[in-house]
Image (cartoon, grey):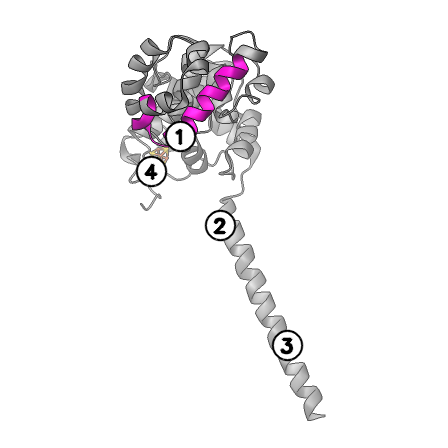
Amino acid sequence: MKKTMKTKTATSTTTKKTATTTGAKATAKAKAAGPSVDKEQARRRVEKIMPILAKAYPNATIALRHENPFQLLVATILSAQCTDVRVNEVTPGLFRKYSGPADFARAPLAQIEEDIKSTGFYRNKAKSIQAASRKIIEEFDGRVPADMESLLTLPGVGRKTANCILGNAFGVPGITCDTHVIRLSRRLELSAHSDPVKLEFDLMEIVPQRKWGGWTMFSHYLIWHGRRVCKARKPACDQCPISAYCPSAFQVDR
Ligand code: SF4
């Protein structure tokens, strides 16, 4: 009898422990997922903030200097884990030396590495630039393709880079989910996702594709606002023109 009771007590303790662990896991998961987002409210918020940001940043544009889609592709690959300022210091000399994909395709890899070294992660970046250049020559007639599907086949190109090229070099609407777009979308409760691809698809549902500059300008507005006002640490909510519509206004604690 005693043995049965002991077994029951042990079972109940284990059940409690399991429940506590499951509860803690669920809470952690919920925290990681962030606030749940009402898409209709998020859509209305976008309608309010976009014209304000468009007025605040009439000259918003991409910071990476480039003269053609191929230069933008190279600059975007170089910008991974590197500031745009640094990339802009490197690219003028780089593009004087390598005038297009053919030059990068035939150059010794070690030479490309040397030429882009100061942007960091130069071995992988050099490999991607050379492999993308070769593919562009072999499969796309020497020109950067202007559609998402083809761009994604190029080494070193993910959706972020592809959207950046589509929007800024070809005028095809695209939302570039960089660190600023991710942070601001969360603070503005436009999406519960931090994963850039999931976020991109959420934003495509609530941001007008062409109105107020559409998807491409929406990315620029958030990036500009993130760099100037809504910084990662200590956002300047008291100077923010969209604070009236921001659920996180004056509540970000770091
Ligand atoms: S109110 Fe504050 S948290 Fe919200 S967007 Fe503006 S600066 Fe960022």
| Distance Cα–Cα, label 2 vs label 4 | 18 Å
Look at the numbered disc 1 and say if its residue's Cβ is closer than 8 Å to ligand 1: no
Q: Residues within 10 Å of mark 4 (few under 14, many from 20)?
A: some
Residue at which label 3 appears: 12
Q: Residues within 10 Å of mark 3 (few under 14, many from 20)?
A: few
Inspect this view and state whether residue 41 appears. no
> Which residue is pictured at 41% across the width and 24% down the height?
126
Residue type at the position of mark 3? Ser
**Labels 1, 2: front one:** 1
**Residue 13, percent across and down?**
60, 76
**Residue 241, percent across and down?**
33, 27
Q: Residues within 10 Å of mark 2 (few under 14, many from 20)?
A: few
**Residue 33, percent across and down?**
52, 45
User: Which mark sits nearer the N-terminus, 4 or 1?
Assistant: 1
Residue at which label 4 appears: 232
On residue 123, the disc is: 1
Start-end of magenta stretch? 115-136
Residue at which label 2 appears: 31
> Which residue is pictured at 54% across the width and 21% down the height?
154
Q: Write down the quadrant of residue 246 in the picture.
A: top left
Q: Give the image quadrant in which the ligand numbered 1 is located.
A: top left
User: Which mark sits nearer the N-terminus, 1 or 2?
Assistant: 2
